[in-house]
Image: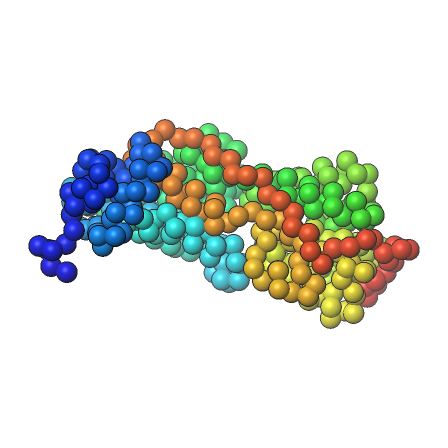
Amino acid sequence: MTAASRPTIADVARAAGVSKGLVSFALNGRPGVAADTRARILAAADDLGWTPSVRARSLSTGRSFACGLVIGRSPDVIAADPFFPSFIAGVEDEFSTTGQVLVLAVAAPGEEETEVYRTLAAGRRVDGVILSDLRAADDRIALVEELGLAGVTLGVPDIRSPFSSVSIDDGAGVRAAVDHLVSLGHTRLAHIAGPSWMLHAAHRRAAFDDAVATAGIDAIVVETDFSAAQGAAATEHLLDLDEAPTGIVYSNDQMAVAGLGVAQRRGIPVPAQLSLTGFDDTDIGRYLYPALTSVATQARLWGSRAARSLLDAVAGADPEEIALPSPTLIVRGSTGPAPHPPTRGSGRA
C-alpha cells in the first residue's frame, strides 16, 4: 500500500462517526474513551486496514511505543513454566490493538538485571515496564522510578510504590486447596513452595501455614525455585518420610506434574494413596491422568489488565490498585478421600 492510499486517522474518524482526536486517544491506548466507543473505533480501523506508523508517532509524541518485561528467573525455569506464555498472550491481546511492542528480556537478579533496565531506559527504548515476581523490599521499584519510566507491578509491593499494581489473592487459592483436602479427610499435608524471597511465593506459604493451623493438622513445607526438577526432588523427600503426607499442595502446576510422575514411578496410586493440587491451572494439567486439581488464576487476563494499566500510566493516569477476581480451585481427578488407615512409610524410609 502506498502512502497516498494508506488509510488515515481522518478516514477512521469518518467511518466511526467520531472526531480525529477521539480516534487518536483510542488508537494510542489513552484513557477517557468509553469502552463501546473504543471498540467501534478499533473495528473501523480494522475494516479499513489502518496500521500505525510507529516512526511518525514516535517523532510526534516522543514515545517509543514499546514496553518492557524483564523476567528475573533462570531461562530454564521460564521455558518450562506455562504461566509466562499465557501471561504474554494477554499482554499482546492489549498491545496488538494499539501498535505497542513488547520488549522481553531475561536477566539474573542483581547487577545484570539492573543493567538491562538501564539499557531499556537509555534513549527511551521503552516507555514503561511490567515488574513481575515482586520481591521483599524490591529495589527495582526505586530503580524504575529513578530511570523515569512508567511501571506497573504484578502484585502489591511491601514498600512504597509510585506505580499501579494488578494482583490476585494468591492466598485464597492455597486456602481453597487446603480446605478441599481437609474436607476429604486428609490430616497430614505438605506444601512444596516457591522461593521465599518472591512475595507471591511467600503469600502462598503464609496462606498454607494459616489454613493448616486453623484446621489443626500436621504439615510440612519444602522450599524450591519453582522448577519441575526441584518440585520432583521435594516430592521424593516427602515420600521418603516415615510419616509421609497424604496430600501435597504445590505452588505451581509444573512442580505438581513432576510430583505426579514421581508418585507413579514409585507405584503410589493418585489419588487413592496420595492427593496432589497445583496452582495456575495450565493446559497440560487438564490432560494428565489423573487430571490435575489446580488453582485457576487466569494468567491471560492478568496479562491484558497489566498491559492496559501500563498504557494508562504511560498516558499519565494516576496509579491505582487493581484486584483481579479471586482464584478458584478446579477439582479434578488428582484429589480424593484420604487413605484409611493413613499411609505410613509409603516411601523408601
The residue sitting at 83% across, 48% down in the picture is 185
Where, by quadrant of the figure, is residue 172 drawn? top right
71, 324: nearer the viewer = 324
Q: Position of residue 154 (x, y in %)?
A: 48, 42
Question: Where is 266 relative to 20, above or below?
Answer: below
Furthest toward the left, the residue is: 4
The residue sitting at 11% across, 55% down in the picture is 5
Count of numbered circles in the view: 0
261, 287: nearer the viewer = 287
Furthest toward the right, the residue is: 341
The N terminus is located in which quarter?
bottom left
Q: Position of residue 340 (x, y in %)?
A: 89, 55
Question: Where is 331 relative to 140, above or below?
Answer: below
The residue sitting at 74% across, 50% down in the picture is 190
Describe residue 56's horizontal placement relative to residue 71 as left or right: left
11, 181: nearer the viewer = 11
294, 134: nearer the viewer = 294
Q: Position of residue 69 (x, y in %)?
A: 39, 49
The colour scheme of the drawn protein is rainbow
Q: Would residue 202 be seen by someone viewing this image from the given angle?
A: no
The residue sitting at 18% across, 38% down in the picture is 20
The C terminus is located in which quarter?
bottom right
Describe residue 173's horizontal placement relative to residue 90 as left or right: right
Q: Would residue 183 be seen by someone viewing this image from the given angle?
A: yes
Q: Position of residue 251 (x, y in %)?
A: 63, 50
